[in-house]
Image (cartoon, rainbow, N blue to C red):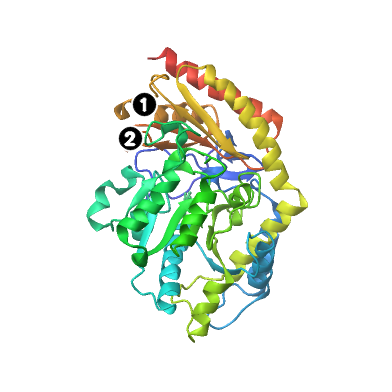
Amino acid sequence: MTPHYPKGYVFYRNLHYSYPLINHGRGLYLYDVEGKKYLDASGGAAVANIGHGVKEIAEAISSQAQKVGYLNGMQFTHFPVEALAAEISKFLPFTSGKLYFLTSGSEAVEASIKLARQYWVENGQDTKIHIISRKPSYHGNTIAALSLSAREHYKEIFRPMLRKNIKIPAPYCYRCFWHEEYPSCQMKCADELEKAILKLGKENVSAFLTEVIGGTTTGAAVPPAEYFKIIRKICDKYKILLIVDEIMTGIGRTGKWLACHHFDLAPDIIIMGKGLTGGYLPLSALAVKKNIVDSISKKGRSFLHAQTYSHHPVGCAAGLATLNWIKRNNLVEKSSKMGGRFLKELLTLLNHPHVGDVRGKGLLLGVEFVKEKKGKTPFPRKKNYVEHFLSRAMTKGLILWPNIGHADGVNGDLILLAPPFIITQTEISKILYILKEVLFEIKNNE
Ligand SMILES: Cc1ncc(COP(=O)(O)O)c(C=O)c1O
C-alpha cells in the first residue's frame, strides 16, 4: 500500500509523466512502494556503476558527515580530498596530475574551458579564446556547456542565449557526415579539427573539447583507433589544449578506468563525474596536467573558479569509498568482460528490421533504431518511436536511457544501455528478452 505523503509540491523534470515512487534499491534493481521491481539497465543516467544500496558507501558518507560535513575549499584541506586525488592520479594517463573537485558534470565542463583560458592568459597568449567541439555531442545543460553541445532539442528555446562555436563532425561512423566508410574515409572527421583551427587562426583557439567514446548523443559510438592519434597531433602542432569529457565514460564504464586508455591518449584536461561516486552523492572532477597548474601558480595566482561546494569532504569520502569498492570487487574488469558478452547478445537484435546498429565498449552500449535499414532512414520524429519503446519497457520493469535527433538534428531514436558493473548473465538474458518483446510488439502495432 502506498504510504501517505504530501503531494503537489515538486517541480518535476518531466511534467507529463506519472512518476513511480521508489522506496529502495539493491544491486541492479529498484523497488517502488507498490512493490514493483525495476531492472536498471541504464544505471539511471549511466551513473549507478556499482549498483544500488551498497552499505559501505552509505557508511563512508555517514562517517565523514559525522566528522565534518563541510569545509571551505579556500580555508582547509581534509583526508578524503587528499586520498581521493591520490587514488584517481594512479589511473591518469599523465604523471603528477592535479585534481579539482566540483559537483556536477556541467559545472566541471564550464570550469575546464575557464581553466584553459586562464592557462593561455598566464602564458601571455590572451587571444586564445575559442573552443572547438563536435556534433553530435553533449557536455551539459548550463549555458556554456550547452553552447558547446550539439543536442539540438535541448538548445532550441535557448538558442538566442547560447554562444556560437565551430563544431566538427564526430566520428559517428554509422552516420558518417560524408556518407563514407572507414578506413577509405581516411579519417576526414579528425582532419576537420585542423581546418577549424586554421579558419579561426591558431592564435585564437584555446581548446578542443571532445567525448572519447560517444555518450547519449551518438549512442556509444566508438571512434577508429587512429582517431585520437590524429587529434593529439593536431592539438600539439597548433598548441591547442585537448580537453576530454569522460563524465559518462570514466571510472570503468567502458571496461578501463578511463576511455582514454583504449586509445593510449594523454589529454591535457580530463573531466569526470557520474560514476565517480556511483551516484551516491554529486561529485565531478577535473584532472589537470601539472604544467597547467604550475603556470598559473608561477604567476602568483590560483584558478579563478570559486564554488561553494568544491572539494566537498562528504562528496570526496563517497568518491573514495566508491573507488575502493570498484577495486576490491574488480568491477572495471567485470565491466569489460560483461560488456563483451552483452554486446555479443545485443548484436543478435540486428536481425530485427528496426535495429539499424548496435555498438559500444565495456558496459556503455547503444542500439539505434531505424524505419528502414538499407538507407538508415530514421523514424519520423512525430512517431515518438523511442518514447513508446521506453514506456513499454518500463511497464515490463526495464529501465533504459533514450536519445533522439542524432540522425539529422531532429530525427533519430536510440537507447543506451549502461547497467551497473555487477550485471550477471541472468540479467543480460532478461534485458534481451524484454528488448525483443518490445521490438516485436511495436512492429506488430504498426
Ligand atoms: C558526456 C557528458 N558530459 C557532460 C554531462 C553533464 O553532466 P551533468 O548532467 O552532471 O551536469 C553529461 C550528462 O549526461 C554527459 O553525459
Please give the label number shown on residue 408.
Answer: 2
Q: Position of residue 30 (x, y in %)?
A: 59, 40
Q: Nearer the viewer, residue 80 or 18?
A: 80
**Residue 408 sits above or below residue 322 on the image:** above
**Residue type marked 1:** Pro
Q: Secondary structure at mark 2?
A: loop
Q: Position of residue 407 (x, y in %)?
A: 37, 33
Task: Describe residue 268's horizontal placement relative to residue 178 as left or right.
Answer: right
Question: Residue drawn at (54%, 50%), measured in percent from left and top?
Answer: 229
Q: Is the C terminus in the top left, top right, bottom left or bottom right quadrant?
A: top left
Q: Position of residue 157 (x, y in %)?
A: 25, 49
Q: Secondary structure at mark 1?
A: loop
Please give the label number shown on residue 378.
Answer: 1
CB under 8 Å between callouts 1 and 2?
A: yes
Q: Is residue 285 visible?
A: yes
Question: Residue drawn at (50%, 38%), measured in percent from left and top?
Answer: 221
Task: Describe residue 313's horizontal placement relative to residue 355 as left or right.
Answer: right
Q: Nearer the viewer, residue 157 or 211?
A: 211
**Residue type marked 2:** Asp
Q: Nearer the viewer, residue 42 or 165?
A: 165
